[in-house]
Amino acid sequence: MKDLIEKAFRDDKITRRTFLKGVGAITVTYSLGAAGVLGIDAHTANAAEDEPIKYIHSCCTVNCTSRCHLKGHVKGGRIVAVSPGDFPGRDDYPNACLRSMSYAQRLQDPKNRVLYPMKRVGQRGEGKFEQISWEEAYDIIAAKLMETKEKYGAQAASFFTMSGNLAKLAWESTTRLGATFGGTTYITEGLMGDHGASMGMRLVYGQERGGHDTRDYMNSKLIIMWGRNLADTHTSDLRYLIKARENGAKVIVIDPRQSSTAAVADQWIPIRPQTDPALALGMMNYMISRNLHDVAWLKANSCAPLLVRDDNGQYLRINGSYAIWDNNSNSIVPMGMMGADPVITGNYTGPDGVSCHPSFVDLAKEAAKYSIKVTAEICGLEERTVEQLAHEYATMKPAGIRMGQGMQRVYNSFAPFRAVATLAAVAGYIGVPGGGASHMGGTASINPIPGVNVPDFNFAEWSNTGGAPFIQEKSSNLYNKMENGDIKFLWIGVSNFINQSPDANRVIKDLLPKVPFIVHVDPYWTWTGKYADLVLPGKTHWEVWDILVRSPWVMLDQPAIATMGQSKSDCEICTDVAKRIGLGHLWNKTDEEWVRTFMTSKHPAFAAFNWDKFVKEGIFARSDGIFEPVFSFKDQKYKTPTGKFEFYTEKLKQLGEEVPTYKRMLEDPQGELGKKFPLVCINYHDRLNVHSQHMLYPALKLVTSEPEVQINTVDAQARGIVHGDKVKVFNDRGHCILKAFVMEGIAPGIVALANGWTPDQYIEGSFQNITHFTINPVEEFISQTNSAFCDVLVEIKKV
Ligand SMILES: Nc1nc2c(c(=O)[nH]1)N[C@H]1C(S)=C(S)[C@@H](COP(=O)(O)OP(=O)(O)OC[C@H]3O[C@@H](n4cnc5c(=O)[nH]c(N)nc54)[C@H](O)[C@@H]3O)O[C@H]1N2
Ligand SMILES: Nc1nc2c(c(=O)[nH]1)N[C@H]1C(S)=C(S)[C@@H](COP(=O)(O)OP(=O)(O)OC[C@H]3O[C@@H](n4cnc5c(=O)[nH]c(N)nc54)[C@H](O)[C@@H]3O)O[C@H]1N2
Ligand code: SF4
Ligand SMILES: [Mo]
């Protein structure tokens, strides 16, 4: 494989199309790994031959699920290649994808980088800036901050971040500056579009993470990737999925698109977007009506037997305790009573004559609305597909589900994760090897919950914000606040805000003009930068001291190359600003000093920690690390109000959402809007980039060099569109123009755009011109609205 690609690259004969056609969709994924090796050869060859290569470690701190440990090959002060670093305790895990290989080019190319502090001189958006000194930049910022505080109060200054660099100092400096100043900071997950998963998980599991190590699928008979494109978005774990399949597990992908993961699966189920809760309910109904559900598991570990009052839908309590009907004593007894035999069906009369029923009755009733026929119709699937899926899931024991963010970028975004996890509970698969309904799914940990860190680091001083009230608002409030003129100063860090937030036209035309002053810190020139008043040159993670905590490991970022231009780290910038506004006492360390402080833990797991070794190896493994595959909820303990797996949420009774439900899309193709804009436009995260951090490495360009809209042959033909045509994707909010990728691998009526590509790579416009941000009252009640990036209707025409 490697030879084939290598030769093709060398001869420069291969075109993207022939490449795809020749080796098939599977090898698109493959090419990431194989061609990466090429990158090293090519770059190393260009460097001075006589100088020895120095290896400097770093961590890939972009927001990709893998978070790989990387080794920079440095020659002549430049990174000439990147290769995987070791993970102590895990010989099987080193990984570096082609995106990371591209670092060698991307971050050292002055054309891409902001090199100096830049002050806007033209109109916002025009892209005209002049270089200023750091002193001048700091003076401007300090003056604006103090003026804002005096006139409107410190909270009128907002400090907004997303996920451009997840290392400790880079990710948190902007927020910490905001907190020490007394400004407003944000819980960004809502606007960012990842919060539906968190809400759904919290409702049923009582926590936002809970998963199975991907290696645990060696114990599975069936694995379902549900709206999760692991092959592209969690590259380092694809190997374990492949192994599990070789071990005999059947792999099913539920996705409106034939994703890279679907290409390596046994079956692809092309579900209609946002109908996942209906499919899960239909599968539950299949099981319950055929007695295939795990009654024993439900009785022991879930809220199923807990009695609910008929009069108000709240859990019945006796002496402050949740209650069950005990078959042994034929009476209502407190939950957890020794020797009790709970029931999960029927109707009972409580202490004051109040009638009640086990909460499972409500779930079963909701599920009963979804016969195979109804489910198939809603989901756009054949009845036998739904029936076979339900049957296999119930009988191929154990079956594991990996849920992906793809299915939760919808209106009612909490519903998919909640419904699918409940399906796994009905089958009795939660907390058992090879089972689960996992969110993300880490790889190793120091506690049995992958992805949940236990911080024993010395973060005390960093966490001290000097007594200022820590104002953290829902990010779902951000647009309204801007619109109302409540934000007088806006600092945007580690976020390509315009490119990654919904409804870019609204942001640009209606929201940003109401914000008098905007600072953007970024190593690269971005769409967001164009609309800022000051653009400050940030450093990349190859130029700074920082750590990334990924339990049981800690990875180190350290300067590997000379600083590009006059760039500074986020922490350095915040420190210098803090000094000018009287907060110097809270910002009195260099980045390296902070990192050294963080690592001075008294915890016994750090006893063997040695700074010089850390610098040399770039990674430290805690001595209490668990390196075997772990999975959540082995102990069947849940942090929900009932302490059980909770599919019945009493506080949601008032909103009619007490059990998982399916609701139609907000932008419904069968509704009025569908007459004008009949196509559902979903998004996916691309193998070619991590969000807007495009890695335009030549080998990646060979796979795709520009954004494309995926469209089914039927829809294309109906519009006279052929593969490669220039098309306009539009709705009332805006449009983008790009090439059409006509394929069978997407369900008719649905089109898909890759997240992340920037306007300069489109022929015109952006994917973000057609998205919207619509407040959802139920989500606001639970927590905050999640961006429904995939609940979008469009029409497409050839241009
Ligand atoms: N339509 C649509 N929109 C989406 C999504 C979608 O699927 N569809 N996905 C959403 C999701 S899940 C997410 S997580 C978000 C991600 O949104 P963002 O976090 O904004 O995405 P990135 O493009 O990775 O990074 C933002 C910026 O951080 C910069 N950066 C990198 N390192 C540093 C650093 O050390 N310091 C500073 N100051 N800047 C740095 C990068 O150059 C980049 O410009 O996008 C969301 N937006
Ligand atoms: N290469 C790369 N890796 C990344 C990222 C990146 O930008 N690039 N981003 C990282 C981040 S921040 C995140 S949040 C994760 C996201 O990673 P994933 O959880 O894999 O999410 P997506 O790629 O957004 O969507 C996964 C799949 O869901 C499908 N999908 C869309 N709508 C629906 C639906 O209604 N139902 C179902 N069943 N499927 C649907 C899409 O077609 C897509 O193939 O990836 C992380 N990893
Ligand atoms: S982009 Fe993701 S898979 Fe690639 S090296 Fe970085 S963390 Fe690993
Ligand atoms: Mo994300």
Image: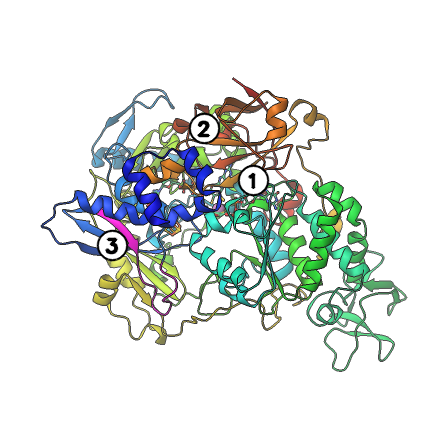
Q: Is residue 443 above or below residue 272?
A: below
Which amino acid type is shown beneath numbered disc 2? Leu
Q: Which residue is mark 3?
A: 558
**Residue sitting nearer the eye, 278 or 32:** 32
Residue 543 visible within the image: no
Q: Which is more N-terminal, label 3 or label 1?
A: 3
- Find the magenta span and give its range: 80-94
How far apart are labels 2 and 3 at the CA level? 36 Å
Q: Residue 166, position in %: x, y? A: 38, 51
Q: Whole-percent x and y of residue 660?
A: 71, 52
Front in this rendered view, residue 776 or 11:
11
Residue under label 1, please give it: 787
Q: Secondary structure at mark 3?
A: loop
Residue closest to the eye, 249 or 560: 249
Q: Position of residue 39 (x, y in %)?
A: 28, 45
Q: Who's the residue at 29% across and 41% down the image?
A: 538
Q: Based on the displayed image, in which of its 4 quarters is residue 147 positioned?
A: top left
For the residues bearing labels 2 and 3, Cβ distance under 8 angstroms: no
Q: Badge 2 is on which residue?
A: 512
Q: Is label 1 within 8 A of ligand 1 (CB to nearest ligand atom)?
A: yes
N-terminal of the pair, mark 2 or mark 1, is 2
Residue at image position (50%, 42%) is: 192
Q: CA distance from mark 1 to mark 3?
A: 35 Å
Disc 2 to disc 1, how far (Cα)?
A: 19 Å
